[in-house]
Image (spheres, helix red, strand yellow):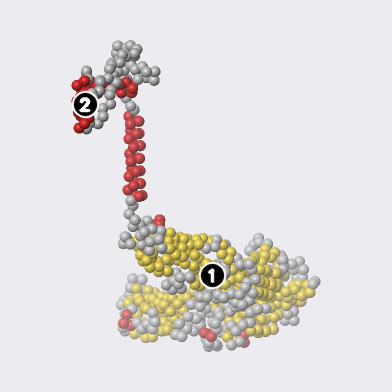
């Protein structure tokens, strides 16, 4: 049965303004989806409806628009005019930029973060570290732990660890053995993805106190997707600290420069030492001179005493004199150190140190040693004569009574014989001579004078000076085998004893040191002289038997229009040459060992133009060489060669 078409309802709406659009208020009947059956029904409906289907649709749309645009009170707005406002360009640009940034962030997050290749290499994902103590006690064991990790999917090939140990570090062992104990290199091979490990390294630190040091580790590797090598670096820093050692020096609070005094040095709490060697050292150069010690000092080092490695305590009593300080100074400082060296004995470290400070008492007595006219240290050669003087000056306000003066000469020795030739001593006063063997290589000889030998020593009045002269030669190669003497330095010291208000007083002057260089000698001579051919044969002869010589150079200028044919040169060592421009003939020898005691050079000088007024063929000959033992330069001048 066909449905009736809906009847039109009368609008009760108020009258709208003339300019407002007119809307059909007729209800729109919903249209069901069409099927074959519904199509037939629609056909029947369309027959009974007064309007068309299109009119129904328009009415339905109008009602929907009215619902959209009507005001809350049911009225319709005035839609006769609309105002449009132009948007800001800046706002549009800002919105566009904001949109672009957001779009880029989304693309980056999806493309790079979420979908990054799993095998990409990043150096920041190679983690390396080295750890150790911030403060390290000298001489105690230390441990370094090296950690490494490959925190990524990429495999690291050809991986090596190289450790740069701090100065003074002595390697002992490691949890993973290195390539060698001295290399500091560990071959790790390939480091797989997310692989990690660590190495513990053990050793001992030697060094001076309060040193800032560091240990560094380098990890070198080649990522599997690269052909080049990469490196990561890590380090740890630390400060060296003194071990807990008790160090003390006992002595007088005030001393008189030159007067004998006693020091007692004690070390305790050292513990046993398993390294190389250790010693007690007094840095007395220019400050203190030892006369005696209750323990034997090391050879060649008067103020150094070896400490047994199993000793936990050590003490030594030293008797000697303090030297005069610099002008204006009222005190003296004497550094004392406890030192150790590693197993190789190549480096020495100070484990602990202290300083002995003492005041200066005004010196009323001045004692001076003079050798060959100087009060300063001097260089001599075997065969030279020591012309010595002992000078005593009373600068006090009191007279010195019953004075005994003494000259003490310490010199190199072999087989209990001094290098000084004491049988040839020249002493007008005939003082008492006493010999004393100080060590296998040092012997002491002393000369003592009393008021019986020199009446002026009975009383030395204030401001008065007494001088005693004597001389003694140094043995030469005809008197001794000089190469047997292991040492080369001697000293002369003046001592004085007098009777004061409190008994006998003893004073000692500052020592004067003499260094005995090698007995290098040189001479030149004619070999032949052919006036018809104007050819002169010359020979230079070097002799030496005490110390090895180095960097020997001999030269002389040859006068006139001359030449020195190379064919005439007979060179036993080194090289010889003649400079045609400077007319200088030179002979150079790199080394002359003691086993070679003589070197003769021969050459000929050819004169091409004769000058009747010429009287000299060659200038004075100059020889320069370095004593390989003393380190001193030797300078000799030879005579000129006359025609």
Query: Are there few (<14), some (14-19), or many (20+) residues within 10 Å of tag 1?
Result: some
Query: Residue at the spot x=34%, y=47% of the render?
Result: 110
- Residue sitting at the far front: 1
Q: Comparing marks 2 and 1, which lies closer to the viewer?
A: 2
Apparent side of residue 272 relative to residue 101 in the rendered image (left or right): right
Q: Nearer the viewer, residue 124 or 532?
A: 124
Residue 587, relative to residue 102: is it above or below? below
Residue 126, relative to residue 74: is it above or below? below
Q: Quadrant of residue 461?
A: bottom right
User: Which residue bears the numbered disc 2?
Assistant: 42
Q: Nearer the viewer, residue 384 or 481?
A: 481
Query: Residue at the spot x=69%, y=80% of the render?
Result: 448
Location of residue 592 in the rendering, given as x and y in whole percent from the top left corner: 44, 81
Query: Residue at the spot x=50%, y=61% of the render?
Result: 236
Residue 32, relative to residue 401: is it above or below? above
Q: Quadrant of residue 328?
A: bottom right
Is the N terminus in the top left, top right, bottom left or bottom right quadrant? top left
Residue 284 showing in the rendered view? no
Is the C terminus in the top left, top right, bottom left or bottom right quadrant? bottom left
Location of residue 136 in the rendering, given as x and y in whole percent from the top left corner: 56, 64
Q: Quadrant of residue 33?
A: top left
User: Which residue bears the numbered disc 1?
Assistant: 204
């Amino acid at each position: 049965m066909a449905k009736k078409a809906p009847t039109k309802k009368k609008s009760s709406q108020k009258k709208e303004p003339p300019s407002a659009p007119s809307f059909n208020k007729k209800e729109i009947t919903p249209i069901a989806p069409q099927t074959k059956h519904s199509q037939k029904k629609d056909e029947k409906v369309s027959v009974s409806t007064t309007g068309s289907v299109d009119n129904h649709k328009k009415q339905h749309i109008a009602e929907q628009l009215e619902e959209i645009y009507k005001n809350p009170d049911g009225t319709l707005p005035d839609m006769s005019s609309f105002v449009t406002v132009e948007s800001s360009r800046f706002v549009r640009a800002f919105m566009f930029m904001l949109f672009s940034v957001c779009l880029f962030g989304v693309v980056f997050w999806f493309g790079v973060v979420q979908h990054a290749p799993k095998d990409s290499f990043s150096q920041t994902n190679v983690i390396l570290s080295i750890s150790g103590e911030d403060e390290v006690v000298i001489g105690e064991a230390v441990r370094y732990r090296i950690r490494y990790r490959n925190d990524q999917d990429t495999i690291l090939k050809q991986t090596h660890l190289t450790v740069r140990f701090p100065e003074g570090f002595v390697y002992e062992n490691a949890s993973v053995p290195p390539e060698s104990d001295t290399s500091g290199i560990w071959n790790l091979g390939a480091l797989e993805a997310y692989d990690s490990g660590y190495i513990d390294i053990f050793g001992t630190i030697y060094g001076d106190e309060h040193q800032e040091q560091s240990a560094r580790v380098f990890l070198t590797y080649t990522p599997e997707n690269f052909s080049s090598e990469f490196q990561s670096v890590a380090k740890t820093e630390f400060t060296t600290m003194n071990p807990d050692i008790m160090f003390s020096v006992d002595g007088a609070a005030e001393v008189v420069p030159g007067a004998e005094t006693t020091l007692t040095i004690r070390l305790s709490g050292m513990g046993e030492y398993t390294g190389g060697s250790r010693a007690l050292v007094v840095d007395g150069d220019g400050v203190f001179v030892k006369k005696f010690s209750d323990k034997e000092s090391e050879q060649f080092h008067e103020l150094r005493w070896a400490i047994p490695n199993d000793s936990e305590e050590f003490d030594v009593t030293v008797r000697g004199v303090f030297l005069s300080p610099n002008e204006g100074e009222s005190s003296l400082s004497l550094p004392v150190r406890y030192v150790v060296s590693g197993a190789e004995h190549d480096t020495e470290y100070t484990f602990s140190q202290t300083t002995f400070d003492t005041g200066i008492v005004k010196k009323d007595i001045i004692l001076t040693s003079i050798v060959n006219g100087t009060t300063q240290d001097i260089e001599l050669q075997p065969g030279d004569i020591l012309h010595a003087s002992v000078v005593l000056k009373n600068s006090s306000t009191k007279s010195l009574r019953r004075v005994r003066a003494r000259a003490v000469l310490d010199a190199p020795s072999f087989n209990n014989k001094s290098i000084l030739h004491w049988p040839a001593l020249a002493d007008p006063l005939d003082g008492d001579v006493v010999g004393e063997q100080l060590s296998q290589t040092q012997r002491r000889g002393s000369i003592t004078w009393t008021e019986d030998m020199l009446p002026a020593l009975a009383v030395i009045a204030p401001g008065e000076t007494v001088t005693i002269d004597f001389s003694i030669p140094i043995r030469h190669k005809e008197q001794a085998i000089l190469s047997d003497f292991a040492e080369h330095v001697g000293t002369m010291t003046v001592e004085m004893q007098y009777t004061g208000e409190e008994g006998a007083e003893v004073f000692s002057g500052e020592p004067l040191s003499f260094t005995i260089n090698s007995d290098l000698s040189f001479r030149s001579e004619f070999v032949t002289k052919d006036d018809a051919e104007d050819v002169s044969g010359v020979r230079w002869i070097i002799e030496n038997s005490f110390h090895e010589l180095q960097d020997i150079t001999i030269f002389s200028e040859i006068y006139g229009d001359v030449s020195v044919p190379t064919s005439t040169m007979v060179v036993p060592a080194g090289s010889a040459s003649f400079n045609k421009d400077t007319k200088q003939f030179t002979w150079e020898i790199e080394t002359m060992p003691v086993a070679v005691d003589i070197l003769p050079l021969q050459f000929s000088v050819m004169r091409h133009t004769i000058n009747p007024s010429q009287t000299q063929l060659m200038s004075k000959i100059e020889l320069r060489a370095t004593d390989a033992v003393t380190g001193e330069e030797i300078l000799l001048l030879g005579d000129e060669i006359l025609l």
